[in-house]
Image (cartoon, rainbow, N blue to C red):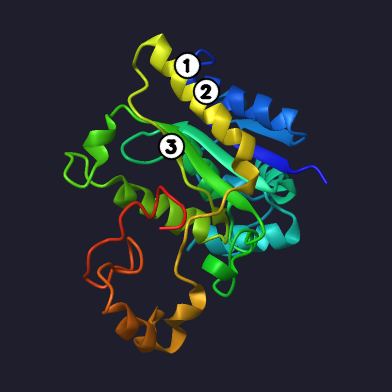
Amino acid sequence: MAQKVLIVYAHQSAGSFNAAAKDAAVEVLTAQGCQVEVSDLYAMKFKPSATADDITGQVKDAEHFCYGEETMLAWKEGRLSADITEEQRKLSDADVVIFQFPMYWFTVPAIMKGWIDRVLTKGFAYTSEKRYSQGIFKEKKAMLSFTTGSLESMFSVNGINGDINVTLWPLQNGILHYCGFKVLAPQIFWAPRVSSEVRCSMLEAWRTRLQGLLGEMPLSFTPSDSFDSELGFQLKKSIEEKQKSEHHGLTVGTHLGMCIPPNSQIKAGV
């Protein structure tokens, strides 16, 4: 059966490098027999703010409005706004999700963050019981593909921006892995304001990767059952003791006060 791919795309210009990267993904994946759908957030004028307007009909508690609880109830009752419902339909259909964007302030643009806030509603995308390795989307894959205005050296362990693995942890662990996605290594385009020859070389490398993207192994994260719910979801003592004999911590976030495992957020199998 053909794989279904959703590209969530955020850039204002059709002449941008991000647009070229998005178009390359559509072309290469379609040629492989994939069904590719694109959510062009700026063209759609997607609303980025999470408000009570996202719910049709009455909210449960207008005085003490809680977006997460109210949208979960609205999702269950089929009362979410049409734009959210359509994006949830696309996401439900997809086997693979690619987020294509320019990095803004070390994270995604506001319009894409709004897509995340509004589309990944509680109940639809996660619950307190279904998250991380037991997450709702554990049969799906997702990845980040983005441009930066920085050199690769600036995001190194001794670079002025800090380790890129630390930068990516909130996005890849706190959003994608949290919802259960198998997270593929990111595609990072460093400092795209370069010569046309270098731009073409970067796009060609992306095209080459896309040829085998669907068969790639995902990044590694600590399984949910490694944490003890009765101890506030802290790492189980047996696993913590075992890890003390290693040079590195388990992950960027669960590092146990040890060295952060190198490149664990940008390469699979490390």
What residue is rendered at 21% in x and 40% in y?
161
Classify residue 40 by image quadrant: top right
Q: Earlier in the sequence, mark 1 or mark 3?
A: 3
Classify residue 53 by image quadrant: top right
- Which residue is tagged 2? 204
Q: Quarter holding the C terminus?
A: bottom left
Secondary structure category for the residue under label 1: helix
On the image, the x and y values in percent for residue 170 come to 38, 54
Residues at circles 2 and 1 in contact by the CB criterion of under 8 Å: yes
What residue is rendered at 37% in x and 88% in y?
238
Q: In the displayed structure, does residue 109 sit left or right of residue 167?
A: right
Crowding at dot 2, Cα within 10 Å, few <14 / some 14-19 / many 20+, comes out as some
Q: Mark 2 or mark 3: which is in front?
A: 2
Looking at the image, residue 98 lies above or below residue 236: above
Looking at the image, residue 26 lies above or below residue 171: above
Q: CA distance from mark 2 to mark 3?
A: 29 Å
Type of amino acid at the residue the image marks with label 2: Glu
Type of amino acid at the residue the image marks with label 1: Cys
Looking at the image, residue 170 lies above or below residue 34: below
In this view of the protein, which residue sits in the foreground, 204 or 82? 204
- Which residue is tagged 3? 110
Q: CA distance from mark 2 to mark 1?
A: 6 Å
Type of amino acid at the residue the image marks with label 3: Ala
Q: CA distance from mark 1 to mark 3?
A: 28 Å
In this view of the protein, which residue sits in the foreground, 118 or 80? 118
Residues at circles 1 and 3 in contact by the CB criterion of under 8 Å: no
Q: In the displayed structure, does residue 106 sit left or right of residue 215?
A: left
Q: In the displayed structure, does residue 88 sit left or right of residue 134?
A: right
- Which residue is tagged 1? 200
Label number found at residue 270: none
Secondary structure category for the residue under label 2: helix
In this view of the protein, which residue sits in the foreground, 207 or 146? 207
